[in-house]
């Protein structure tokens, strides 16, 4: 059920998107040196002679970076190459100390793989081309140093896993959803801290448009998108720009572009970069300082064995054990925190479907509104579990539960039962009392009884209404109907 | 003590120290005087007399406390391609004028740990690119045997200093012959070990898959002592070979099975690649080498005819691979973090181009251009990849030879040292002259140059000729053994140039 | 096939080298002289031959040695920058970079 064929058309054009994601790996030290990867140190205090490419220095590979690449490869069901090669990508840039980036070119460490996710109710599969190990560059600080640029090489040599997809995505929404899923996965695996503000997870989007059925159009690459919102906006802007160009009889030129969210009067714009354009001939060749990286099958098996339960597997278990629909199960496993919340709440109330509904509904809504992550939700798993428990045992109605939830959210109390009492939301389930109440009611409404017996159903509904009113809505409507039917014979 | 101090080699000096005949301070002071007296050779790029004397004093102190490591207190000097924390390092280039490394090369650190005294740094071709030492930004080095001739290169300063008795030994590096060829041109002994035996950490990279460090001294015995201290696994070099430390002196002395005092080389099969004796080989070199081979026969060796059919191909193969790697290795010299930066420029691109145009000399630029071209889009397969495939074929040719012989022997270079300025106008002629040293470099095999006599007549009369010995992987011991046996029977390696004085 | 002046200009730009016209002309001649000795290479049939990227793989499998993930470097900024052409606030300064 992939959407690899024609996607939603925009002004009669199909959008084709591939993503390249740079995930900084969560190693203590750099990929080729013993420098710390800690973020935020004073400029160049974490740049060793190797990172600075001082004469005579040589790279030595970090096992931790390789281990994380294997973890990713296993997680996405890719082939982890038995032998892969490090190559030099040659170009001059002040934040690239050696004048080349050590990367992987012809034979990457991770080959293939799939990432699956939902957009609304529709499932999508995005195929990965590859994921390869490489070193990050330093940072250029453009704020004025007497008209010059300052170079900080603390980031130079931070290990990156570049994850490249096939051109499988057909809308900016799908691209953003893929990026969120990938982000959740690398964080789940513990191979990347996922901190997008600090640049730990950055996306480049390759975007092209075509008339349905036509061959791929020429693509432009939008670089360094460090939020899902920008990713989606940038693609939307780029698509409109490309379509405008084509409609005006122009042709898209292959280029790398940057996204400026404030450009074009706040509507955002993508503009081609100047600096890197000439440096296109990278003169890749195998790095003679680094023999081939060989990964023994045993190592891959060790990593597989030590792997946490993956979101996919956990979602399948939730479907199996708790009978959740796939969509609910994926929502409940969108992050480790969500999964933990779901399992804790379900353990308490034994109503998995209700828990899923609440998490996707009320809870998600309130978290969004307050911009909170689920791990610091004012209503914790235990509390929500207790609340749902009271719906399950009929103590309160859904409407009542929603009122309690609001009270819990704003911190009126944390005791569900106390709130039920103080708000008088307990449903009336005591048959004896209801019995009496209905007898009085029938006596008092002889007219309606007559009409009902005469075959007017409306009269019956009126009676139910009366009963509910008399019980200030605490009665269980099902129970009332049942009793009335019995008494009216 | 009969011989003047500066005539003593490494082992002899160590013995003299042990016998309390002379102190390291005395030897060091004497060599510092000689350095000043022979400044005209142009071998030295820098000397730190105070530091050297301080090291000598502490070496003498250690000896007084009973320490007696074989190199303790022995003065030597380093090719300026090795970075040093306490001395400037220029790699013979303007690009690195006044550069100070924050660390020592592994080879430098290991020799220091062995107790040697560092007198200073020795001249070399810029970034080790050259075979005459005429590509140094700091001026040419003169051959002590004939001051109008080159000492060879790129380790020309090291060769000239050892030949002129300015130091008993020096470090060198060899990428395509840069230890063996200057050793041959200057009449000293030098060995390039198997690729990976000496750490490349702190050796300014020319061609990473070819560069190897090695010692240059007056005898195989001295080379064995130095190589033992220089070599060994280094975790900072991913191409460094993990194997137990080798006692090269012991390997050198170990008698061959069935050997006798008169025939120490009994049973040794010496392979002579017919491609190493072409018509173009100068008669002087041919005579000296064949005489040396006859001497080896006398010592019990048997000569066998072998073939290295791709010897001539090794020239284009090497001159594609080495410049390709060099073009990338030298990209770090961009004027941003260290080294030369142009004084005037309009923008970043202009700064790069002017900085590198001013900082690099003509030969370095030439090789950067060749290397960038053969790696550039559309040419990689035809040039770089094809060269790497031929490189494997060349390495396989050697393995076929070693099925028939134990060591390979031949000339180091087609001629003796040429005149200063003699080949400057024709870079390709210099490349062709590397023909006999390139094959072993491409294969990563150990190779050695042993003084084998002198040109008897002709334009280069009186200039030294070297015998090249090539061994199979990690057979440094066999090379040193053969060379040592040869040097026990000959005195070519003891000859000193006229005018090096007392 | 001989290189053209355009080739030399393109490669010089790739390699970030500035040549005066005379130098560039000389370079063209020298490069073509060099490539004339290279041609013999292309004649050799190397089909099925593995390139020899690192010499010792001629006799055995050479594999990458891996380092443990530990921080071994401390802040040596002052020492590491002692040969830097232009530094301010610990940053290396370069002409403004335009993106």
Image (cartoon, coloured by chain):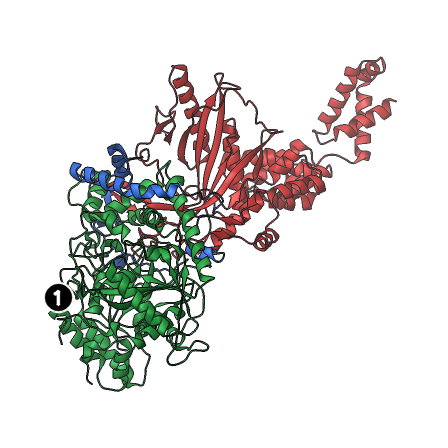
| Looking at the image, residue A287 lies above or below residue A252 | below
- Nearer to us in this view, A412 or B468: B468
Quarter where residue C73 is shown? bottom left
Would you say B437 lies left or right of B500 here?
right
Would you say B342 lies left or right of A215 here?
left
- Nearer to us in this view, A240 or B190: B190
Rendered blue, the chain in question is C
Would you say B203 lies left or right of B244 here?
left
What residue is at 25 percent from the left and 54 percent from the top? B127
- Nearer to us in this view, B343 or A319: B343
User: Where is residue A332 drawn, in percent x and y?
Assistant: 61, 39
User: Where is residue A58 drawn, in percent x and y?
Assistant: 36, 56
Res. B335 visible in picture: no
Q: From the image, which quarter does the C terminus of chain B lie in?
A: bottom left
Q: From the image, which quarter does the N terminus of chain B lie in?
A: bottom left
Question: How many other residues sit within 10 Å of disc 1, few (<14), some (14-19) or many (≥20)?
Answer: few
Would you say B104 lies left or right of A247 here?
left
What residue is at 74 percent from the left and 23 percent from the top? A466
User: Where is residue B356 drawn, in percent x and y?
Assistant: 22, 45
The residue singled out by tag 1 in the image is: B39
The hue in which chain A appears in the rendered picture of the protein: red
Res. B429 visible in picture: yes
| Looking at the image, residue B405 lies above or below residue C6 | below
Quarter where residue C22 is shown? top left
Q: How many numbered circles does the render carry?
A: 1
User: Which chain does the residue under circle 1 lie in?
Assistant: B
| Looking at the image, residue B281 lies above or below residue C40 | below
- Nearer to us in this view, B264 or A452: B264
Mark 1 falls on what kind of element?
helix
Rendered green, the chain in question is B
User: Where is residue B355 drawn, in percent x and y?
Assistant: 20, 45
């Amino acid at each position: 059920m992939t959407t690899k064929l024609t996607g939603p058309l925009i002004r009669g054009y199909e959008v084709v998107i591939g993503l390249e994601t740079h995930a900084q790996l969560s190693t203590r030290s750099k990929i080729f040196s013993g420098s710390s990867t800690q973020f935020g140190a004073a400029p160049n205090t974490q740049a060793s002679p190797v990172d600075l490419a001082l004469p005579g220095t040589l790279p030595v590979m970090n096992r931790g970076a390789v281990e994380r690449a294997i973890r990713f490869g296993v997680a996405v069901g890719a082939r982890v190459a038995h032998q892969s090669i490090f190559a030099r990508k040659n170009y001059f840039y002040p934040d690239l100390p050696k004048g080349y980036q050590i990367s992987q070119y012809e034979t990457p460490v991770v080959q293939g793989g799939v990432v699956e996710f939902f957009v609304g109710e529709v499932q999508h599969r995005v195929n990965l081309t590859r994921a390869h190990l490489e070193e990050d560059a330093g940072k250029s600080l453009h704020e004025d140093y007497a008209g010059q640029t300052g170079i900080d090489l603390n980031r130079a040599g931070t290990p990156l896993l570049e994850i490249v997809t096939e051109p499988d995505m057909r809308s900016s929404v799908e691209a953003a959803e893929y990026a969120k899923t990938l982000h959740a996965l690398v964080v789940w695996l513990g191979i990347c801290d996922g901190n997008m503000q600090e640049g730990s997870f950055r996306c480049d989007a390759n975007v092209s448009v075509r008339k349905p059925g036509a061959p791929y159009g020429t693509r432009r690459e939008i670089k360094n998108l460090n939020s899902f919102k920008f990713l989606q906006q940038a693609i939307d802007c780029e698509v409109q720009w490309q379509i405008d160009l084509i409609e005006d009889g122009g042709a898209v030129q292959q280029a790398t572009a940057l996204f400026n969210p404030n450009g074009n009067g706040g509507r955002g714009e993508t503009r081609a970069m100047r600096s890197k354009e000439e440096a296109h001939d990278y003169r890749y060749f195998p790095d003679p300082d680094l023999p081939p990286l060989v990964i023994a099958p045993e190592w891959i098996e060790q990593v597989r064995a030590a792997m946490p339960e993956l979101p996919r597997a956990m979602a399948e278990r939730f479907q199996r054990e708790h009978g959740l629909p796939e969509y609910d199960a994926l929502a409940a496993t969108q992050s480790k925190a969500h999964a933990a919340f779901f399992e804790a709440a379900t353990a308490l109330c034994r109503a998995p479907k209700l828990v899923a509904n609440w998490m996707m509904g009320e809870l998600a809504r309130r978290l969004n509104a307050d911009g909170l992550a689920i791990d610091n939700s004012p209503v914790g798993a235990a509390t929500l579990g207790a609340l749902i428990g009271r719906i399950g045992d009929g103590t309160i109605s859904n409407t009542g539960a929603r009122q309690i939830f609001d009270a819990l959210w704003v911190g009126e109390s944390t005791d569900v039962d106390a709130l039920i009492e103080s708000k008088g939301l307990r449903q009336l389930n005591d048959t004896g009392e209801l019995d009496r109440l209905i007898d009085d009611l029938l006596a008092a409404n002889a007219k309606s009884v007559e009409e009902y017996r005469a075959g007017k159903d409306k009269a019956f509904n009126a009676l139910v209404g009366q009963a509910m009113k008399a019980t200030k809505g605490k009665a269980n409507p099902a129970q009332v109907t049942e009793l009335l039917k019995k008494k009216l014979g | 003590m009969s011989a003047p101090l500066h005539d003593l080699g490494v082992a002899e000096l160590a013995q003299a120290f042990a016998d309390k005949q002379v102190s390291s301070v005395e030897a060091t002071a004497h060599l510092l005087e000689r350095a000043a007296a022979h400044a005209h050779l142009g071998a030295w790029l820098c000397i730190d007399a105070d530091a050297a004397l301080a090291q000598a004093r502490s070496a003498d102190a250690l000896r007084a406390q009973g320490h007696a490591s074989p190199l303790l207190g022995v003065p030597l000097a380093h090719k300026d391609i090795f970075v040093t924390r306490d001395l400037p390092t220029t790699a013979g280039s303007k690009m690195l004028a006044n550069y100070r490394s924050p660390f020592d090369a592994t080879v430098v650190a290991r020799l220091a740990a062995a107790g040697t005294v560092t007198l200073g740094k020795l001249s070399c071709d810029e970034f080790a690119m050259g075979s005459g030492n005429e590509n140094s930004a700091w001026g040419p080095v003169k051959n002590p045997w004939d001051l109008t001739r080159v000492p060879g290169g790129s380790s020309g300063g090291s060769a000239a200093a050892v030949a002129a008795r300015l130091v008993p030994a020096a470090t060198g590096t060899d990428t395509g012959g840069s230890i063996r060829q200057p050793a041959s041109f200057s009449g000293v002994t030098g060995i390039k070990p198997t690729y990976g035996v000496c750490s490349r950490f702190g050796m300014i990279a020319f061609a990473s898959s070819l560069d190897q460090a090695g010692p240059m001294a007056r005898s195989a015995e001295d080379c064995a002592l130095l190589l033992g201290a220089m070599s060994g696994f280094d975790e900072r070099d991913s191409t460094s070979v993990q194997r137990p430390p080798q006692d090269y002196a012991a390997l050198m002395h170990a008698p061959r099975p069935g050997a006798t005092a008169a025939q120490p080389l009994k049973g040794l099969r010496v392979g002579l690649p017919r491609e190493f004796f072409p018509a173009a080989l100068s008669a002087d070199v041919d005579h000296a080498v064949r005489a040396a081979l006859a001497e080896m026969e006398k010592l019990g060796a048997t000569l066998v005819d072998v073939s290295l059919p791709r010897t001539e191909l090794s020239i284009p193969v090497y001159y594609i691979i080495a410049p390709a790697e060099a073009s990338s290795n030298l990209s770090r010299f961009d004027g941003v973090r260290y080294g030369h930066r142009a004084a005037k420029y309009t923008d970043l691109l202009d700064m790069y181009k002017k900085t590198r145009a001013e900082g690099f000399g003509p030969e370095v630029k030439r090789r950067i251009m060749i290397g960038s071209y053969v790696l550039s889009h559309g040419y990689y397969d035809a040039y770089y990849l094809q060269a790497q495939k031929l490189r494997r074929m060349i390495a396989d040719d050697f393995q076929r030879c070693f099925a028939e012989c134990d060591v390979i022997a031949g000339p180091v270079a087609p001629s003796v040292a040429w005149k200063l300025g003699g080949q400057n106008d024709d870079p390709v002629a210099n490349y062709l002259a590397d023909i006999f040293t390139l094959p072993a470099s491409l294969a990563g095999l150990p190779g050695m140059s042993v003084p084998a006599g002198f040109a008897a007549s002709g334009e280069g009369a009186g200039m030294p000729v070297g015998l090249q010995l090539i061994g199979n992987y990690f057979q440094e011991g066999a090379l040193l053994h053969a060379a040592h046996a040869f040097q026990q029977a000959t005195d070519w390696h003891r000859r000193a140039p006229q005018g090096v004085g007392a | 096939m001989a290189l053209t002046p355009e080739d030399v200009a393109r490669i010089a730009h790739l390699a970030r080298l500035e040549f005066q016209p005379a130098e560039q002309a000389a370079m063209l001649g020298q490069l073509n002289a060099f490539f004339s000795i290279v041609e013999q290479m292309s004649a050799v049939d190397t089909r099925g031959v593995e390139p020899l990227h690192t010499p010792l793989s001629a006799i055995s499998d050479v594999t990458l040695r891996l380092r443990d993930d530990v921080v071994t470097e401390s802040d040596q900024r002052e020492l590491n920058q002692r040969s830097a052409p232009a530094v301010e606030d610990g940053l290396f300064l370069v002409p403004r970079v335009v993106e």
